[in-house]
Image: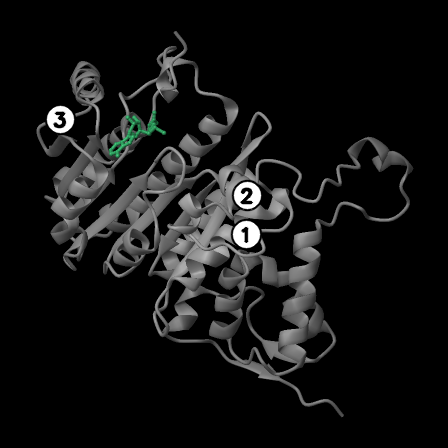
Amino acid sequence: MRSDEIEDTPYVEGTLTKLQIFELYARAWLPVFTSKPNPFWKKLHLFDFFAGKGQDCDGTPGSPLRLLTEVKAKAGDICAKALKVTVTVCDDKHSKIEALTKLVHENSLAPRWLGFDPREGDFPENFTHYLPILNDPETACLVLLDQYGFKHVGADVFQTLAACPRTDILFFISTQYLHRFKAHPSIRKYMELEAIGDYYHAHRAVLDWYRSQVPKGQTYYLAAFSFKKGRNLYCVIFGSGHPKGMEQFLQVAWKMDPTSGEADYDLNRENFSELAPYLEFDMFQPKKKQVFEAALEKGIRDGELRSESDLYLFCLENGMLPSHASPVIKKLKAKGFIACDFTSPNRSSLKSPRPFLIRPKN
Ligand SMILES: C[S@@+](CC[C@H](N)C(=O)[O-])C[C@H]1O[C@@H](n2cnc3c(N)ncnc32)[C@H](O)[C@@H]1O
């Protein structure tokens, strides 16, 4: 009989993309707290709420093993600074939690200094159980929600997580399912998606829906990375209340997709690489970067972006890295339209922006 469990067959390419995003983000997130000489956050808690049994049928590590491996790589700092680190792994299947626990011990991934916390049960109950930790301002949390489908991260769960003070989230969404059945009552119960548009860009509509769920006045950063599994599309959505988290996620995303930082496929169906030697004009300046640069230049020229911090936040809001602002800043400096000592805006500008002068047009 065919099994529908993700680990019973080798992880497909899209699954590996997703796992790599989880892994790379954990790798970027941990040092924020472990590498400081005297860390403010002494308690770190990583959650994998849909952990599975730890590996696929070929022994390729799944999300919980990857998280634990990343934590173990920071053993020196964690022990030297006496940080309290806990990794919680949950699943509703007893057999999976049992298999995962065995695997973790066999691979020496639960050393004595680490709190390894396996828990069996249904997600809503687990979520309620751990909410006090997620809400604790003295604990830095990283949450993976690698659900099947989409329904466990509806408006309530999302808003609850977005309100947690020091919690970054990464969750899986079956974009193609939402795209196909958006009008179905079983979906509208969770998510009222209106125009979802082009299938290839459906993750943007889903991301916009989550943006619309952030309470007015709350600063919250969101980004999505879309990937294919066969012909189907899925995405990982990232959320954080902190610009540093967003910048780190975008670094992961741009590493995975140097063209547009948001998908493992050609978003605009414009792969002209075979024609490259014959094309006289530059087809390879990716559209997303071009559009961003035009919008940034317009924002500066129209006087809407007036400071280094405006520029920095404009980059993040558009899913771009601060370095992506460089061509425009350099160009406008060369034309004498702006004066500043930097070529890309920095996060430190949120506290102390460097001078940025727009010269009035003559
Ligand atoms: C996509 S798989 C997770 C795969 C895993 N992260 C990995 O890397 O292999 C989703 C997991 O969620 C579990 N699950 C399904 N419904 C659940 C629920 N209501 N509460 C908790 N776990 C659930 C499944 O048993 C399955 O292991």
Q: Badge 3 is on which residue?
A: 111
- Residue 246 against residue 16 in the figure, above or below: below
The answer to whether any part of residue 261 appears in the image is: no
Furthest residue in direction bottom, as rendered:
362
Q: Badge 2 is on which residue?
A: 179
- Would you say 164 lies left or right of 183 here? left
Toward the viewer: 170 or 30?
170
Query: In which quadrant of the rendered view does residue 129 lie?
Result: top left
Q: Tell whether label 1 touches label 2 (CB within 8 Å).
A: no
Element carrying mark 3:
loop
Screen quadrant of the N terminus: top left
Find the distance from the CA under tag 1 to the CA under tag 3: 41 Å
Instruction: Looking at the image, tell me whether mark 1 or mark 3 is earlier in sequence order.
Output: 3
Figure quadrant, ligand 1: top left
Element carrying mark 2:
helix
Q: Residues within 10 Å of mark 2 (few under 14, many from 20)?
A: many
The image shows residue 287 at horizontal and vertical percentages of 71, 52
| Nearest to viewer (mark 2 / mark 3) | 2
The image shows residue 171 at horizontal and vertical percentages of 37, 43
Q: Badge 1 is on which residue?
A: 204
